Image (cartoon, grey):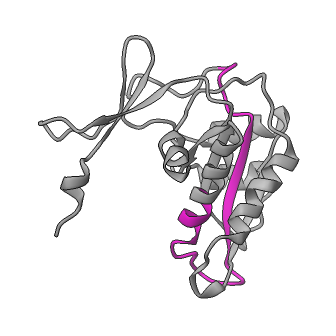
């Protein structure tokens, strides 16, 4: 059921690093993005894939993790993603991707959840470092990085409390809590 996939599609930031994801699986996930909607059907998105420990080690240091968790620098060795999909905009097709990368990322992440995987959409990227690390030509804008793996953490949804705080947090057992606004609050009519 789609609602179950959406509920399970959380921002996971800790993974079983000893459980690799194959390049073939990444290609299957990108195919979901390829089949997704695109503004004016222009299809300006391209993808760079990383599924080897050597390549992943180049991607990892270019990413920032969990801005609300000030005392956490990101996944420790042994808990890092086992694959990445870098979503790019081909500026020779269109100068801007509009919202296409959001649509594509959601399709990929839902497909990942269906396969028992999880991930995190990361927009806080040292783009020039990543460009150099993966030898990405200048014609491509780096839009998002999807970090993927078999989740090693539990993520739960909570209602936003009376104080209105939407910041995610971890409890003493390491469970990641994500406050969500109520349905009544977000529908305005």
Residue stretch rendered in magenta on the structure: 77-105
Q: Is residue 81 magenta?
A: yes
All told, the count of numbered labels is 0
Q: Look at the image and tell me whether residue 143 can be seen.
A: no
Q: Position of residue 76 (x, y in %)?
A: 61, 20
Give the residue displayed 73% in from the left and 69% down from the top.
34
Residue 114 location, quadrant: top right
Residue placed furthest toward the left: 162
Considering depth in this image, is 97 or 38 the residue closer to the camera? 38
Considering depth in this image, is 74 or 187 the residue closer to the camera? 187
Give the residue displayed 50% in from the left and 48% down from the top.
6
Q: Position of residue 46 (x, y in %)?
A: 74, 68
Q: Is residue 69 left or right of residue 106?
A: left
Q: Position of residue 47 (x, y in %)?
A: 74, 61
Give the residue displayed 82% in from the left and 55% down from the top.
27
Whether residue 18 is situated above or below residue 157 in the rendered picture? above
Give the residue displayed 54% in from the left and 28% down from the top.
74
Q: Is residue 29 left or right of residue 4?
A: right
């Amino acid at each position: 059921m789609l609602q179950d996939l959406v509920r399970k599609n959380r921002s996971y930031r800790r993974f079983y690093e000893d459980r690799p994801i194959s390049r073939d699986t990444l290609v299957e996930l990108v195919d979901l993005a390829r089949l997704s909607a695109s503004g004016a059907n222009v299809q300006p998105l391209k993808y760079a894939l990383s599924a080897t420990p050597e390549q992943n080690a180049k991607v990892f240091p270019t990413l920032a993790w969990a801005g609300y968790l000030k005392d956490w620098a990101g996944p420790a060795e042994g808990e890092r993603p086992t694959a990445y999909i870098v979503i790019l905009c081909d500026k020779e097709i269109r100068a801007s991707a509009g919202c296409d990368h959001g649509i594509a990322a959601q399709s990929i992440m839902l497909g990942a959840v269906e396969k028992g995987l999880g991930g995190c959409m990361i927009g806080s990227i040292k783009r020039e470092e990543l460009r150099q690390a993966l030898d990405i030509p200048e014609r491509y804008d780096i839009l998002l990085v999807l970090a993927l793996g078999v989740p090693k953490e539990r993520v739960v949804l909570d209602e936003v409390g009376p104080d209105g705080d939407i910041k995610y947090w971890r409890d003493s057992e390491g469970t990641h809590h994500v406050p969500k606004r109520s349905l009544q609050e977000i529908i305005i009519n």
